[in-house]
Amino acid sequence: MIFDFQLRTPKQGMVDITNEVTEAIAESGVNEGICIIFCPHTTAAITINENADPDVKSDFLLGMDKTFPELSGFRHSEGNSDAHIKSSAVGASETVIVASGKPFLGTWQGIYFCEFDGPRTRKFYVKVMSD
Ligand code: ZN
C-alpha cells in the first residue's frame, strides 16, 4: 500500500512531515515493519533531523547554500543546478523502522521534506511494509 501526500512549499525550506508519516503508518494497520518515505522530485529531498530548535532548519539551509552555491560555470539552462545537487546530496528517500504502529525515531528527530527550488506544489510517497 502506497500513501501519497501533497504539500505547498516555500522558496527553500524544511517542512516537517512526521505527522503525515505517522498517519500513513496508522492507516496501513502495520504494527511492526519498515516504512519508506520517497520524494519524486529532482530539486527536493527527504531527511531526518532535529525537531526541537527551529534554528537547526535555518542553519541547515544556510549550510547547504554555502556548501553547494550556484556557480557561474553551471550549464543547466533552468538555472537551478545548486538545487539539483542539494537534492542528490540529501537524498530522495529515508527508511524508518515501524514499531508499535509508529515511526521509531529518536527523541529529537523529525522527518522533513526539503525544498531547494520552490515555491512549488510537491508530492511525497509513504510505503509501509509489515515484518
Ligand atoms: Zn533543473
Image: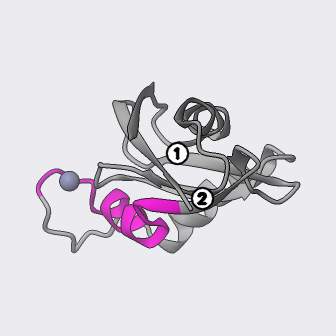
- Residue sitting nearer the eye, 66 or 49: 49
Q: Are marks 2 and 1 in contact (CB under 8 Å)?
A: no
Ligand 1 lies under 8 Å from the Cβ of mark 1: no
SS for callout 2? strand
Percent x, y of residue 11: 45, 36
Disc 2 versus disc 1: distance between alpha carbons? 22 Å
**Residue, disc 2:** 33
In this view, 124 is above or below 69: above
- Please state the total of marks drawn on the protein image: 2
Going from N to C along the chain, the mark reached first, 2 or 1, is 2
Q: Which residues are magenta?
A: 77-94
In this view, 23 is above or below 62: above
Q: Quadrant of the N terminus?
A: top left
Q: Amino acid at mark 1?
A: Phe
In this view, 64 is above or below 61: below
- Side (left or right) of 10 relative to 103: left
Q: Amino acid at mark 2?
A: Gly
- Side (left or right) of 108 relative to 14: right
**Mark sitting on residue 113:** 1
* 56 within the magenta span: no
